[in-house]
């Protein structure tokens, strides 16, 4: 299936509009609107050493491979002072990914939130971002929208499952629909021959001391995660 260009969308829309007027049936237009609607997915992440960013970019590729889905990368604001960032040798923040404001979440149809784990929970930068979504929570502007998560941890006991479970609370209070991966990725989920991140809750990676990069299997899982989530979000938008 090929995604339609804006010009072709306009042509088809006005063609359906003419048909609806001719046959006095507004269902023509409504059916067209549902079939042509673009599903907007925001991939919102924080990455200190680049591991989560690598996963986010692969998730982006997977999501944008789904027809009529428009996925965009966003990063949450940094809260650490520059002196601390230099001390921990933080990776430079990418120039091609804008910082998101909390109110901008209302523009999207679905979300994938990515973060490193800190003591078994999401990093404080992402927590702070969610703390600033009070207006959206008050109005329940995000209720009913699908959301997924992805992450990095330092090692096995660093929160590969706990960080995911604790992150779900932020989604629940907004009324968002948590979309887990389950075991839909197939045999890669059962691989025992190598250390790998991820779980039924979402895709993940291990950073170790910061020197370990996401493996090929973890990259494949991230790409699949983007495609899988985009497909679910697209179905929910058309309901």
Image (spheres, rainbow, N blue to C red):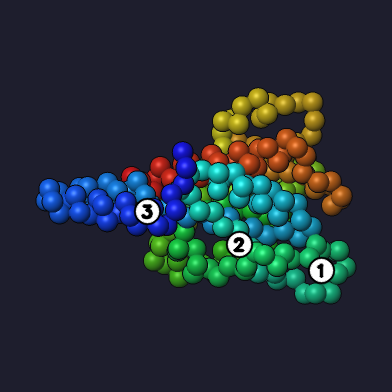
First of labels 3, 2 by sequence position? 3
First of labels 1, 2 by sequence position? 2
Nearer the observer, 213 or 13? 13
The residue sitting at 54% across, 54% down in the picture is 71
Relative side of 97 to 145, left or right: right
- Inspect this view and state whether residue 113 appears: yes
Task: Name the residue tied to disc 1.
Answer: 85
- Inspect this view and state whether residue 117 appears: no
The residue sitting at 44% across, 53% down in the picture is 5
Crowd around label 2: few <14 · some 14–19 · many ≥20 (10 Å): some
Establish if 94 lies above or below 122. Answer: below
Q: Position of residue 42 (x, y in %)?
A: 54, 57
Task: Report the number of numbered marks.
Answer: 3
Q: Which-is-in-front pick, marks 1 and 2?
A: 2
Q: What element carries label 3?
A: helix
Crowd around label 1: few <14 · some 14–19 · many ≥20 (10 Å): some
Establish if 147 lies above or below 92. Answer: above
Q: Which-is-in-front pick, marks 3 and 2?
A: 3
Q: Where is residue 225 in the image (x, y as percent from the top left)?
A: 59, 41
Measured Cα–Cα span from mark 3 to mark 2: 27 Å
Q: Is mark 1 on a helix, strand or loop?
A: helix
The residue sitting at 71% across, 41% down in the picture is 219
Measured Cα–Cα span from mark 3 to mark 1: 46 Å
Measured Cα–Cα span from mark 1 to mark 2: 20 Å
Nearer the observer, 204 or 22? 22
Establish if 73 lies above or below 60. Answer: below
Q: Where is residue 190 in the image (x, y as percent from the top left)?
A: 68, 26
| Mark identifier at residue 106 | none
Task: Name the residue tied to disc 3.
Answer: 9
| Mark identifier at residue 74 | 2
């Amino acid at each position: 299936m090929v995604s339609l260009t804006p010009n072709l969308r306009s042509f088809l829309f006005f063609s359906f509009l003419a048909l609806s007027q001719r046959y006095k049936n507004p269902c023509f237009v409504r059916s067209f609107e549902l079939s042509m609607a673009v599903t907007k997915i925001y991939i919102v992440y924080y990455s200190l050493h680049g591991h989560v960013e690598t996963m986010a970019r692969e998730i982006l590729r997977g999501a944008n491979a789904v027809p009529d889905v428009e996925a965009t990368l966003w990063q949450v604001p940094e809260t650490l002072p520059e002196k601390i960032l230099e001390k921990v040798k933080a990776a430079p923040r990418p120039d091609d990914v804008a910082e998101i404001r909390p109110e901008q979440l209302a523009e999207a149809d679905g979300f994938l939130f990515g973060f490193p784990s800190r003591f078994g929970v999401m990093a404080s930068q992402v927590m702070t971002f969610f703390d600033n979504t009070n207006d959206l929570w008050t109005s329940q502007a995000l209720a009913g929208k699908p959301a997924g998560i992805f992450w990095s941890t330092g090692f096995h006991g660093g929160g590969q499952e706990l960080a995911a479970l604790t992150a779900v609370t932020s989604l629940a209070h907004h009324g968002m629909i948590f979309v887990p991966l389950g075991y839909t990725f197939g045999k890669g989920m059962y691989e025992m021959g190598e250390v790998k991140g991820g779980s039924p809750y979402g895709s993940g990676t291990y950073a170790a001391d910061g020197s370990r990069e996401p493996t090929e299997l973890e990259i494949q899982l991230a790409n699949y995660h983007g495609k899988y989530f985009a497909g679910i979000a697209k179905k929910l938008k058309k309901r």
